[in-house]
Amino acid sequence: MLTAACSNPNAAGPFNSPGGKIYLSQCAGCHGAQAQGGVGPPFDAAGHAHHHSDAELAQTTTEGIARPGQPATMPAWRDRLTPQQLSQVIEFMKLLWTPEQRAQQQALNPQ
């Protein structure tokens, strides 16, 4: 029994994946402990992240979101997450989407 859980990092759910652990420590404060949203939008199936390519998700995360003359609505994470960690978080988010949402988002990524 334990062998299957140890060989599959997602056996205990998406939040146990490498990206899920990073999400919980770095992102959940704004986006919710279950990715349900909070100060920031949800990343689960109820959200809109699946409407953006991997490159767009990475750019938003690394550069943040700022509106002219206003404080940043999302801080830039370029100095806080390595490229590998960022990829792991994006892959974690995909685990929260429906198969249809994953297919829709995959179509946005160049082959």
Image (spheres, grey):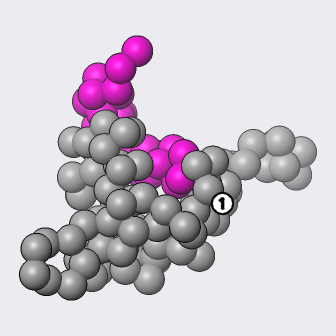
Q: Is residue 45 visible?
A: no
- In this image, 71 relative to 15: left or right? left
Pick the front one: 108 or 7 = 108
Task: Give the dominant element type of the magenta stretch: helix, strand or loop.
Answer: helix
Q: Where is residue 7 in the image (x, y as percent from the top left)?
A: 83, 42
Q: Where is residue 84 in the image (x, y as percent from the top left)?
A: 63, 48
Judged from the image, the secondary structure of the residue bearing numbered disc 1 is helix
Residue for point 10% across, 74% down = 68
- Is 38 located above or below residue 17 in the figure? below
Q: Where is residue 1 in the image (x, y as percent from the top left)?
A: 86, 48
Q: Where on the picture, by quarter, is residue 54?
A: top left
Q: Can residue 43 be seen in this view?
A: yes
From this viewpoint, which residue is outermost toward the right? 3
At label 1, counting other C-alpha atoms closer than 10 Å, the crowd grade (few under 14, some 14-19, many 20 or more) is some
Q: What residue type is labelled 1?
A: Asn
| Residue range highlighted in magenta | 86-111
Q: Where on the picture, by quarter, is residue 70?
A: bottom left
Pick the front one: 71 or 17 = 71
From this viewpoint, which residue is outermost toward the left? 69
Q: Label 1 belongs to which residue?
A: 16
- In this image, 67 relative to 28: left or right? left
Residue for point 31% across, 44% down = 56
The C terminus is located in which quarter?
Answer: top left
- Is 71 located above or below residue 108 in the figure? below
Magenta stretch encompasses residue 105: yes
Q: Position of residue 80 (x, y in %)?
A: 57, 69
Residue for point 37% across, 39% down = 55
- In this image, 104 relative to 62: left or right? left
Magenta stretch encompasses residue 96: yes
